[in-house]
Image (spheres, coloured by chain):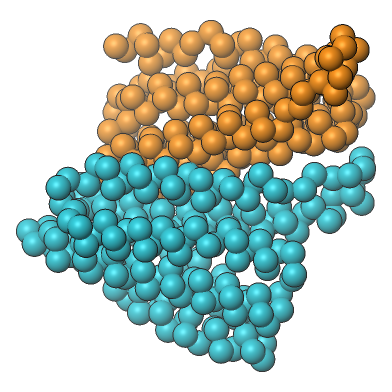
Chain colours: A orange, B cyan
Amino acid sequence: MKPDRLNALTDGVVAIVLTIMVLELKFPAQPTLHAALAVLPLLAAYLLAFINVAIFWNNHHHMMQRARNVTGAVLWANHSLLFCLTLFPLMIRWIDDAGVSPWPVASFGLVLVASAIAYQLLERALIAAEGEGSGIQKALAHGAKEWISFICYVLAVPLAFVSPYISVAIYVLVSILWIIPDRRFVAQE
Amino acid sequence: MNTNRLTSFTDGVVAVIITIMVLELPVPKAPGLAALKPVTVLFVVYALSFIKVGIYWSHHHNMLQAARRVNGQVLLANLFYLFWLSLVPFVVRWVGEAGITRDTIIAFGVIMLLCFLSSVLLHSVLLAANDEDAAIIRAAGQRWKGVATLFAYLVAVPLAFLWPWLSVAIYVAVAMLWLVPDKHFEQLLD
């Protein structure tokens, strides 16, 4: 089966995820510098979540350029990734409520861990759908960056209880690592 | 007419249906495990609604992969299908908030039954619009699963008057039935 509709549903869901995060944002309560500064942490959290969802979408986009065939297993792996991505707006709302504190920051990391696992499942399902030696299998062969970020996310969860700012720093560093595009796919074109 | 716009419209509507509940999900009011408890129920309910809508989308995806053409009847049947599908998050949320009671479980079953019947209707108008591909569309219908599903809902809804939990067990069994990918159909298409 062709991947067109899987891409269309993914784009629809990711567009909603990115949009509803904006709905959680608040205006400064008064037209003063002090009030404007008070909304900055949430704005930064929004930016971080936006970048992370965008990274997943970009990687998905690159990977699906190579995919020729989808199966029922691919559809469900993709659904599980979409489910994880829809939890980012919830994390933003929680950070808005509770501030940069251990529980919401650790949960943000858990959502990243779950999304990374779902993405791995999707890669594996796509490779299984096309077989050994397919373009997608070759392109996905070296996944060092995935593993490094996965380990970082896993470490960031308990570290949030030491200090949530350590975890935030890890999330920012991993995001920077990913903003550099995935050359594995570009190289093949 | 080809299927492109019908599928992209459906994908847009389903993308909204599948995510809309997350807008209203509560977050814990305090740090710690105790505060997680009240939000967990609705979180699980969100996951269930996501799975249910995901099953319907996957089924729609398979049916439309096999179809080449749509007509006015298909467009109307598809709208009818989307209408019932849009009530899934609504009724699932009611179950989450009011709990497993006679009324919520009956309402859930009735919406599920109507989703199912509208998908059968969509399937039959697609068959009528696609003569040459008919065999492959029929394969996407998974006839035995359809008969089992219809029978299960017809039993589960009246059962909810007496034992709502038994109906829940039947609903879960139906969901499991559809979660298993249809390998036979995938091979037919390739």
Q: Position of residue A158 (x, y in %)?
A: 84, 30
At 40% from the left edge and 70% from the top edge, which residue is drawn? B116
At 39% from the left edge and 53% from the top edge, which residue is drawn? B58
Work out whether residue A175 or residue A183 is closer to the camera in this orientation and state it: A175
At 67% from the left edge and 18% from the top edge, which residue is drawn? A47
Q: Position of residue A3 (x, y in %)?
A: 32, 37
Q: Is residue A33 left or right of residue A79?
A: right
Q: Position of residue B113 (x, y in %)?
A: 46, 75
Q: Is residue B188 shown above or below B94?
A: above
At 51% from the left edge and 21% from the top edge, which residue is drawn? A143
Q: Is residue A103 left or right of residue B157?
A: right
Residue B107 occupies which quadrant of the picture?
bottom right
- The mark tally for this picture is 0
Work out whether residue A164 or residue A141 is closer to the camera in this orientation and state it: A164
Q: Position of residue B174 (x, y in %)?
A: 49, 71
Image quadrant where one finds the C terminus of chain A: top left
Res B3 seen here: yes
Q: Is residue B54 shown above or below A49?
A: below
